[in-house]
Amino acid sequence: MIQRPRGTRDFTPQDMETRRYLEGNFRSTAETYGFREIATPIFEHTELFTLKSGPNIIDEMYAFEDKGGRQIALRPELTAPAMRFFVNDLTNYPRPLKLYYFGQCFRYERPQSGRYREFFQFGAELIGAPNPESDAEVIGLAAALVRGSGLANYNIRIGHIGVLRGRLAAAGVGPEKAPAILQKLDKKMYEEARPIMRDAGMMGEDIEEVIRITQLIGPVDLLQDFPGEASDYLREVFQVLRDYGFTNVQVDLGVVRGLDYYTGIVFEVDAPNLGAEKQVCGGGSYSLTELFGGEKVFSTGFAIGFDRILLALDKEGLNAPEKRLDAYVIPTSEGMRHRAFMITAALRAEGVRTDVDLMRRNVGKNFKYADAARARFVVVVGDKEAAEGAVTVRDLSTGEQRVVPIEELPSVVKA
Amino acid sequence: MIQRPRGTRDFTPQDMETRRYLEGNFRSTAETYGFREIATPIFEHTELFTLKSGPNIIDEMYAFEDKGGRQIALRPELTAPAMRFFVNDLTNYPRPLKLYYFGQCFRYERPQSGRYREFFQFGAELIGAPNPESDAEVIGLAAALVRGSGLANYNIRIGHIGVLRGRLAAAGVGPEKAPAILQKLDKKMYEEARPIMRDAGMMGEDIEEVIRITQLIGPVDLLQDFPGEASDYLREVFQVLRDYGFTNVQVDLGVVRGLDYYTGIVFEVDAPNLGAEKQVCGGGSYSLTELFGGEKVFSTGFAIGFDRILLALDKEGLNAPEKRLDAYVIPTSEGMRHRAFMITAALRAEGVRTDVDLMRRNVGKNFKYADAARARFVVVVGDKEAAEGAVTVRDLSTGEQRVVPIEELPSVVKA
């Protein structure tokens, strides 16, 4: 038997109802925020991703050479393709440009719980507005998406890379040495970070102060201890988020990010129910366009792990409303088959989800199938009722049964 | 500047609105017919496709070896993955099983008008009901999808491979020689077909009769000249399609298909506006499960070329309804900014598509942006109105402007 590739999934009808429900929910929230959808190809030139993330990312991607000798990779994320698209074709759109997207991404790594080789991301980018309120707009959308999904238990933490970068600069660390330190601090690898900081000329108390900062999580007031531009900026972001009604937000000065293209705020959302793999959203402000051959443009964006949100919702016992078959149509005799098909067509024309016996089963077996298919109503098309222009309708949840004139049928069975 | 890979496309917000509109249209029609959505991975083991279509398909696919040494291919079509999924996991579902799917497919060939290396298919499979009415159900769905898309100009042609296979058998051609002949006849390559038929022992008049049959297109009555099981079956399919209200359907005995797994009816839909690449849908009944390691199960299915339907709709001048921004909120002064954000949040909470100034532009520039963004209304948040708990609303299509109390604002600007 041929199996699906390792680390990938097939989705059953029940799975897809849940997934499409959440997707629709995300889509309409994003549109309410004035974001508009774009889409890019499943694969890109490998160079797009190595330019953004460095050559090591090749080891974590489905990267291959196509028949024309081009280096191609299945996309591991969607920000680089979105910004590539912007640089290629969208620079003349009025700014700020507010874009969202949803689709498959791919990574080549050992599959594990909640991490698949093919996974789904929903994300957004706000391009061309480097202000606290544009950052708040993006964080607000991320928060609205998570809240709108129905998830009850989640934390939103916001930092600003300027706070820690400023401290490092004040302690005499130059811009060429900071990234290596920030990368270790971002992962809370303090034992590795300390000697690098020492080599960069930092004094013992500066080192411990920097480490303390990366562990600070709390209300916006804790910024009082770190005066400066970055703090003022963050405070304004928090103010706009309050205007938007988001108060369950914390400052986290340990959200750092080691990559050069991050320019200011950084934020994360986690769902504690998920344990070790609890991060469901990550974002920040950045400047990537010049890496891809365009002018320098500031942007803010995020990606939500669609599969992880679903997992977190599942842990909270939340399910999408079930989509049921409205009517299952059963002819009682060979002579009634064509009448059953005509009635089926009439119901479908009214938007009623309708199925009809396609197996020439007897009435008893057809009722069993209707039960198994979880139909709401059975429509029995019999000779006697046909003579009166009617059918018999049974409500499968109550067992009630009555004769209904054909012209009233759609309104009786419509959900 | 990094470009997207050759033969692929990016989709702008306007493109995506059109595409999502058609997708939603297709999805709800399929669900009205009692079909339910499934999804399978973007790539599969290469063997899945060579088992179905023969080893030559490798040349037309994005096939590669992954880092674990597995032969992997980006899916060129969606029937094989759907049937692989059925064999793996869905055999215990009540039958008939009615499934639909929508997604990207890939082919490696020279890009040309209307043919992309990444393209989109919408398709359906009805599994486990080998009856004329189940075939009619599937053709009916295909017809309903095309009609429901709004396309005016299209043809539906249905054949049955049994008619021609029966003729070949009657003329003494064994089942081992028939496929080569059928493949040539399917492509109307008569000069190549004639010598193969002669070598298979057919007489001249039988050969010309077979060729004549492959050219027959017309009303169901033309089946009278070809009595037999296949004709009776086709006539019953047409009867059910008439019950369903589809009368614009023709018999086409030239829809043949050379591959062994086709078992009965075959059908195609074309949009003449598209010229040489006019086929927008192809389908038929088949048996593939045993190739993939399962029990033999009869199925009927089809695939619709999503991009070609869009191209055909475009040629007929049909466009999706435009999704517009409902409201653009402008503060008239620095002091009104936070009030503007609060009003924006209140509108969004009511499902109003709302944007707000994120660039700290002056009022004149903000009005220009609102025009460029095609907003329906501008909401001006000024100090004077604020004192009265109101805002000024301008309808951008009429230019009318009036003061609106905050509590009435959502109902005024909601689409």
Image (cartoon, coloured by chain):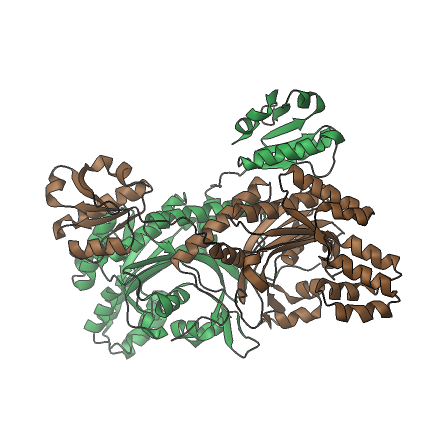
Chain colours: A brown, B green
Image quarter hosting the C terminus of chain A: top left
Would residue A296 appear left or right of A316 to someone viewing this image? right
Image quarter hosting the N terminus of chain A: bottom left
Residue B398, percent across and down?
A: 58, 23
In this view, the residue in front, A237 or A94, is: A237
In this view, the residue in front, A284 or A286, is: A284
Q: Is residue B217 visible?
A: no
Residue A189, percent across and down?
A: 72, 68
**Image position of B155 with respect to B127: above or below:** above
Would residue B266 appear left or right of B361 to someone viewing this image? left
**Image position of B270 with respect to B383: above or below:** below
Residue plotted at (49% across, 72% down)? A6
In this view, the residue in front, B229 or A306, is: A306
In this view, the residue in front, B118 or B340, is: B340
Q: Is residue B321 visible?
A: yes
Q: Quadrant of residue B401?
A: top right
Residue B375, percent across and down?
A: 60, 33
Residue A20, percent across and down?
A: 46, 52
Residue plotted at (24% across, 35% down)? A408
